[in-house]
Image: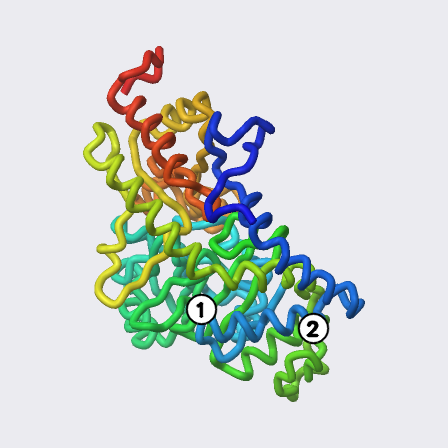
Amino acid sequence: MEPHGSEGPGPSGTAAEAGVPFFSQTATVTRLWPLIERNLHRVFDNGKFSHGQQVAEFERELAAWTGAEYAIGVNSGTDALVLLLRACGIRPGDGVLVPAYSFFATASSVVLAGGRPQFVDIDPATYALDPAALAAAVTPESRFVMPAHLFHGMADTAGIGAVARDAGLTVVEDSAEAIGMRRDGVHAGLHGAGGVLSFFPSKTLGALGDAGAVLTDDPEIAATVSALRHHGRGGDTVNNFPAIATSSRLVGENSKMDDIQAAVLSAKLTVLDEDIAHRARLAAACTEQLRGLPGILRLPTTDAHGPGHEGVHYVYLIETERRDALAAHLERRGIGTEIYYPLALHLQPAFAGLGYGPGDFPCAERASGRALALPMYADLTLDGVERVCAAVAEFCTGDEPRGGDAL
């Protein structure tokens, strides 16, 4: 097996030492291949490739790892959000309060479930929905609030929960990025009616394609999601969720998890704690090397999330006013980056009809113009971190001629 965190070929096919891709899981898959292969053989021998025994086994393992009463596998994190909202009783036109700074699916899932996104500004210290702004944004149409846990930490679930109780809102969590994150010992996604996980390949626990899950402690929500993912069929025979009286009247969809993805996820779950610890070491090394560089406005910290919070460095996000120039400089050095997120949700063309405009949510807009994600994944090595940080320092200190990119 390859050692933990060894690096494979970059996206261009050259050796990783010539650059650092934004994401790779080549070494992880190689390291875990004997276990993945064993799980795959079980799938092939069983002959059921969707919604089968390997999915059921992964669901049990995931529930145990997160502490959830129920984990329901589906085919993507986006579908997980849609099905969770439906299972929680969303009605056409219901207002769902969501952060203005998040991945597109945070808001699009609301529309797909029949609701209406109501945007709320973020706390600039955590990138998550601001409880004070939430309280001011509640309207008579508001029925749900959906905080998103982003990058390396959770939203203020206590503050959001207090507002939700006062306003009579149901809390559902967009915890797609948040596997391993906990507050007061409770895993992300379990601080309200339920939450979701995405297993997109680059996530902390990533598949080899799309996959997702719903987490909940509520048996009725679990049974409804289980039915909705399988064309509305109740009384699931794999998971033995209790049949629900309305199951014959549900119009569901085909959102079952593939057993091949579950086979990969079960194998990767066995080293998830190790991978999370490795990410923490990488993040600490990044912060040590980047701290104090001119032009870097912010480095990630979990301190802003308060006591009792356990973060996970899914993404290492920095802020700089010369974000695009820095990204271009790093690209020339063979270092991959991603912009999270280049346009705040309320300014997306798809939501133009909701009536929001520039300046409505200044914290979200400021983050979308300054935030840049550097490489952060289980295959990354400390040597890779040093190459990334050296290239960032080169840009910030002007040690290399950059023409029009001068800071």
Query: What residue did someone put label 2 on?
Result: 53
N-terminal label among 1 and 2: 2
In the depicted view, which residue is nearer to us: 32 or 48? Answer: 32
* x, y percent for residue 59: 58, 72
Residue occupying the point 80% across, 67% down: 47
Question: Which labelled disc corresponds to residue 172?
Answer: 1
Classify 189 as above or below 101: below
* x, y percent for residue 296: 25, 33
Q: Secondary structure at mark 1?
A: strand
Residue 110 in view (yes/no): no
Give the amino acid type for the residue marked by disc 1 in the picture: Val
Q: How far apart in space, not on screen, are marks 1 and 2 (Cα)?
A: 28 Å
* x, y percent for residue 280: 34, 51
Are the residues flagged by discs 1 and 2 in contact, CB closer than 8 Å?
no
Residue 92 in view (yes/no): yes
In the depicted view, which residue is nearer to us: 368 or 352? Answer: 368
* x, y percent for residue 316: 36, 44
